Image (cartoon, helix red, strand yellow):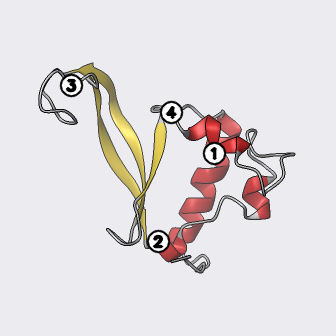
Amino acid sequence: MSGIDRRNKLDVDQFQYRTTKDGTYDDVTPIFYPESDPFTVRFNVRQTIWLSVDKSIPIHEDRIWNALSFTRGQSKSTSHWTGKIRGSLVQLDDAGGALLEAALRAQVNGGRAYEVAA
């Protein structure tokens, strides 16, 4: 399983790609709420890729947009595709995950800088 975490540029100039190390476990220790935290499924992660925010790849980049199952064939002006990734622990299909991982790894080894909107 893998996940992408893009933090607001005003807070932290980073983009992280993390992979799980050991699967999930349950822990009722509150993290997100002071008591009765409903989010008890936890997992250990390993940081795999760390990019400055200007090296993160916009989803509207043709090679990404036209290849992902949840954006392919949709107008870039719509936000309908965002429904797929709004939930927690969203699983991408293997082809989409492999495409994103390869593109991010290429950014680590040179890649292209993108303009970041303020």
- Residue type at mark 3 is Asp
Mark 4 to mark 2 CA distance (whole Å):
22 Å
Please name which of the two marks, 1 or 4, marks the residue nearer to the observer. 4
Q: Secondary structure at mark 2?
A: helix
10 Å neighbourhood of mark 2: few (<14), some, or many (≥20)?
many
- Residue type at mark 1 is Ala
36 up-or-down from 21: above or below: above
Labels 3 and 4: the sequence-earlier one: 3
Q: Which mark is residue 37?
A: 3
Residue corresponding to mark 2: 53
Q: Secondary structure at mark 3?
A: loop
Please name which of the two marks, 4 or 2, marks the residue nearer to the observer. 4
Q: Which mark is residue 87?
A: 4
Q: Secondary structure at mark 1?
A: helix
**Residue appearing at x 37%, y 37% in the figure:** 20
10 Å neighbourhood of mark 4: few (<14), some, or many (≥20)?
few
Labels 2 and 3: the sequence-earlier one: 3
Q: Which mark is residue 98?
A: 1
Q: Secondary structure at mark 4?
A: loop
Left or right? Give the position of 113 relative to 72: left
Mark 2 to mark 3 CA distance (whole Å):
31 Å
**Residue appearing at x 43%, y 73% in the figure:** 52
Give coordinates of residue 88: x percent, y percent: 45, 33
- Residue type at mark 4 is Gly
Mark 3 to mark 4 CA distance (whole Å):
17 Å
Give coordinates of residue 8: x percent, y percent: 41, 64
